[in-house]
Amino acid sequence: MASSLLALLDDIATVLDDVAVLTKVAAKKTTGVLGDDLALNAQQVTGVSAEREIPVVWAVAKGSMLNKAILVPLALAISAFAPWAVTPLLMIGGLFLCFEGVEKLAHKFLHSKGEDEAHRADLVKALSDPAVDLVAIEKDKIKGAIRTDFILSAEIIAITLGAAQGTSLLVQFSVLAGIAIIMTIGVYGLVAGIVKLDDLGLYLTRKASSAAQSIGAGILRAAPYLMKLLSIAGTAAMFLVGGGILTHGVPVLHHAIDDIAKGAGGIGGVLVSALLDAVVGIIAGAVTLVVVNLLQKLRGKKAHA
């Protein structure tokens, strides 16, 4: 009995060790999605009244957990019954990341600031209109954020499944569940903090202490730049992670980049590898964007015909 118990404890310890290592690997790989997830979800709260920001974030967080509760069993089913589909799904997820990154860049450079300012003005005007149903706007924002989260959660789960591929079902479940919980708490905890930064800054500026006032004013000035920084970092990470997934899925390309990186050596090799992954990601995303736009135009022509 004692030896059986020790063997069981040893097995549990081994599984937990595997889970810890794989969770760490998966967390590193999914960090690229995290920056964009933070920026997107923080932006979703724009236009919501200050007292409703945290309830909205909480509602989206609950929706995110539901998304992952659907995605984790689905990922395990794929791993158990169609393991050959893991790599193609990862490739699709990587390609979507790259496409989304290029689409963001295209929107930034192809749309004038006047268009974005006009959209913002329309939103402010709508919110100041007493006839506008603010509850309906809030529900729409929550639904939109949960839809966005589903896509990003699917990418996170797919990347995590790829990291845990080849391990036992128990280890895969533990890693997937662990990443799902960590990412949800981490993302929405930070989102809640970000959307309340301006309130913190305002609170500090009203303090009697000149030091607190200075810190509050600094926070108020820094908050918009933090959002921009998150968006930029998130976009860059999308190309790094998405491009890395694509290059690892094509052995010839992966070996070619490895050979070039080895030639650079050390930190230079790591930087060269990351840069080449990003270049592959940008090219793949740009090609996908062109194809998607062409298909949309063809579909539009058929609809009018």
Image (tube, rainbow, N blue to C red):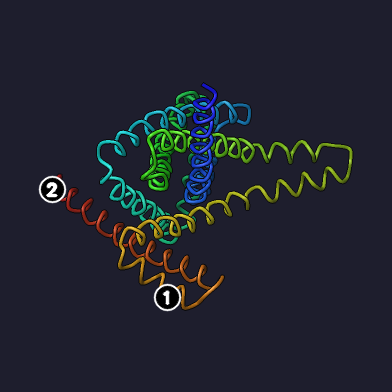
Vertical placement of 43 versus 271: above or below? Answer: above
Would you name the residue on which mark 1 appears?
A: 260
Work out how far the residue at label 1 is from the one at label 2, CA to CA, in angstroms: 47 Å
Single out the mark in the foreground, 1 or 2. Answer: 1
Would you name the residue on which mark 2 appears?
A: 302
Q: Nearer the viewer, residue 163 or 114?
A: 163
Q: Residue furthest top?
A: 1
Vertical placement of 162 versus 174: above or below? Answer: below
Q: Is residue 124 visible?
A: no
- Residue at the spot x=52%, y=32% of the render? 127
> Residue 238, image x and y in percent?
45, 54
> Residue 34, image x and y in percent?
51, 46
Secondary structure of the residue carrying numbered label 2? helix
Q: Is residue 216 visible?
A: yes
The residue type indicated by label 1 comes to Ile
Few, some or many C-alpha atoms within 10 Å of disc 1 (few <14, some 14-19, many ≥20)?
A: some
> Residue 188, image x and y in percent?
56, 35
Q: Residue furthest left?
A: 305
- Residue at the spot x=83%, y=44% of the render? 213
The residue type indicated by label 2 comes to Lys
Secondary structure of the residue carrying numbered label 1? helix
> Residue 185, image x and y in percent?
56, 34
* N-term mark: 1 or 2: 1
